[in-house]
Amino acid sequence: GNSVTQMEGPVTLSEEAFLTINCTYTATGYPSLFWYVQYPGEGLQLLLKATKADDKGSNKGFEATYRKETTSFHLEKGSVQVSDSAVYFCALSDRTGRRALTFGSGTRLQVQP
Amino acid sequence: AAGVIQSPRHLIKEKRETATLKCYPIPRHDTVYWYQQGPGQDPQFLISFYEKMQSDKGSIPDRFSAQQFSDYHSELNMSSLELGDSALYFCASSGETGTGEEKLFFGSGTQLSVL
């Protein structure tokens, strides 16, 4: 079956530091890959996505590249801000039909001023 | 823009009681998904509906049932509640974007506490 593995948190960084959150996946076929962000007390919001190998998703300074050869979709940001503090979930979707998302366990990011 | 609406926002129940959670998808979205997120856990897929028919089933307990109505809203019915059912329950909706790619939009969730 499908699965997503994320690096454990919390990740604590100082403002303007470089961020990497690792994500690897196991899936049959060619899934779509997503990063969702969850702020305290709120629902999940789509941050970025990639639908095929070598695609790069980007949004709000965050980037992730779909690497089929390493089955990875690592999230990066060059300079984090305090407002980026949240929980980040990597997820995949099997594109055969209307399939639900499979989520990773989430990584909490804490950015200190 | 309209988002996914869930009600109630918070719900407190006692063991063995029943609960009903409601989800109103974004207008013109035809697919609804339910997820359960325990404290500090990743969201676990429960069940989904497309055009009022169950389309996929995940780790939904037999004590739970759900349906999607003619106006596309969905209700998750939970009976014989247990302490372990305490969690944040998310609903998400999706519809064709015209590019063949579906995008899920999540509600803010219903926080269920079973005492």
Image (spheres, coloured by chain):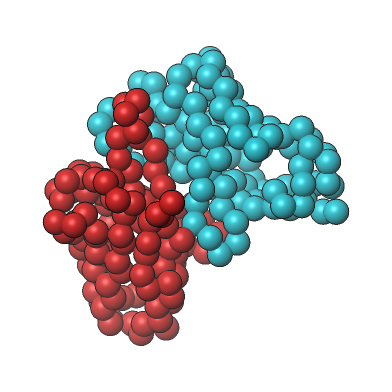
Residue A29 can be seen in this image: yes
Q: Is residue B28 above or below residue B108?
A: above
Asked which quadrant contains residue B98, the reply is: top left
Q: Position of residue B68 (x, y in %)?
A: 19, 56
Residue B35 can be seen in this image: no
Quadrant containing the C terminus of chain A in the rendered view: bottom right
Quadrant containing the N terminus of chain A in the rendered view: top left
- Front-most of residues B69 and A20: B69
Residue found 46% across the figure and 43% down from its top: A103
How many discs mark residues in the rendered view?
0
Extreme-front residue of the structure: B1
Q: Position of residue B115 (x, y in %)?
A: 42, 83
Q: Position of residue A62 (x, y in %)?
A: 65, 34
- Front-most of residues B38 and B5: B5
Residue found 28% across the figure and 75% down from its top: B19
Q: Is residue A27 above or below residue A80?
A: above
Q: Position of residue A112 (x, y in %)?
A: 82, 54
Residue found 30% across the figure and 51% down from its top: B27
Q: Colour of chain B?
A: red
Residue found 50% across the figure and 42% down from its top: A46
Chain letter, colour cyan in render: A
Left or right: residue B81 versus residue B88 is: left
